[in-house]
Amino acid sequence: MAGIRTIRHTWANRPTMEGAGVRLRRVFGFDEVPVLDPFLLLDDFRGDNPDDYLAGFPWHPHRGIETITYMLDGEVEHGDSLGNSGVIHEGDVQWMTAGSGIIHQEMPKGDPSGRMGGFQLWANLPASHKMMDPRYRDVTAATIPVVETREGATVRIIAGTVEGTSGPVGDVVIEPEYLDVSVPAGAAFRHRVPAGHTVFAYVIEGSGSFAPEAGARTRAGHLVHYEDGDELAVQAGELAVRFLLVSGKPLREPVAWYGPIVMNTEEELQVAFREYRYGTFIKSKG
């Protein structure tokens, strides 16, 4: 189906707690599967109270998915069972493919004012790639291109292409697009998207109209899930609006999900957790 995408549904994030006691806002997760296939989860972990985030996410396993962490403020120190370690700074992205299995930790730190925050998105892997070797794409802020569109929007391109400029993340099986879009008051943003792909926008700041027929404006903390089509249109009103725009090719495969592991069958889940208990979870030596 071609044409400008209309809104299928909108909903607000909700408070939850993860890791060792990190307070965050869950935009979508287990309850929404498979509505946003191939995406599984999006967490908004912005805050300015260190007590809400310093406990972090101690050692835990992942298998069968990709985790995409995008930092806006502060930083996250990470390490894993393959000997990798580093820091994700403000404006950076870490695109981690867990594949056959990885055990890691993520420990957030605030900036000098105590502010810390960003987003973590989980993308599913197809059955054919569930057991691929783990890998990282550590994308620094300096390598993420910024484009000013003809309509006046500013777009940071993590993955995908805007007006002939492509982001640094490629070679991902779900053919993702991940954009950070800012539209000034009174300006607009129009963008071509692949027909048949899942597309959603998550409003970070301000409010805007996310489809031509939308009477009400969608405000910060809400997600817009789109119907099919090959283009979308966003209009800012008296206030500017900033949002994440994410799209990807649906897998249309069964999902068996428990905690940090996502496979296709319950039997595969049982194998994964049995291997974790007996120390045979890690298949790649890095």
Image (cartoon, grey):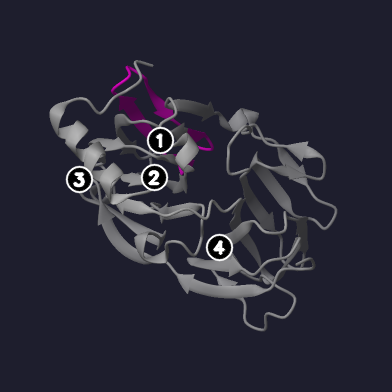
Single out the residue that lies furthest toward the right: 150
- Element at badge 2? loop
Residue occupied by mark 1: 75
Q: Identify which amino acid the numbered label 2 is placed on.
A: Met
Residue occupied by mark 2: 116
Q: Identify which amino acid the numbered label 4 is placed on.
A: Val
- Element at badge 3? loop
> Is residue 68 something one can see in this rendering?
no
- Element at badge 4? strand
x then y, percent, for residue 52: 26, 51
Q: Are marks 3 and 1 in contact (CB under 8 Å)?
A: no
Q: Which one is closest to the eye, mark 3 or mark 1?
A: 3
- The answer to whether residue 69 is magenta is yes
Q: At x 52% / y 28%, what residue is drawn?
A: 137
Q: CA distance from mark 1 to mark 2?
A: 7 Å
Q: Which one is closest to the eye, mark 4 or mark 2?
A: 4
Residue 281 occupies quadrant:
top left
Q: At x 25% / y 56%, what residue is drawn?
A: 17
Q: CA distance from mark 4 to mark 2?
A: 18 Å
Other-residue count near label 3 (Cα within 10 Å), few / some / many at <14 / 14–19 / ≥20: few
Q: At x 32% / y 64%, what residue is drawn?
A: 15
Q: Are marks 3 and 2 in contact (CB under 8 Å)?
A: no
x then y, percent, for residue 44: 42, 54
Residue occupied by mark 3: 20
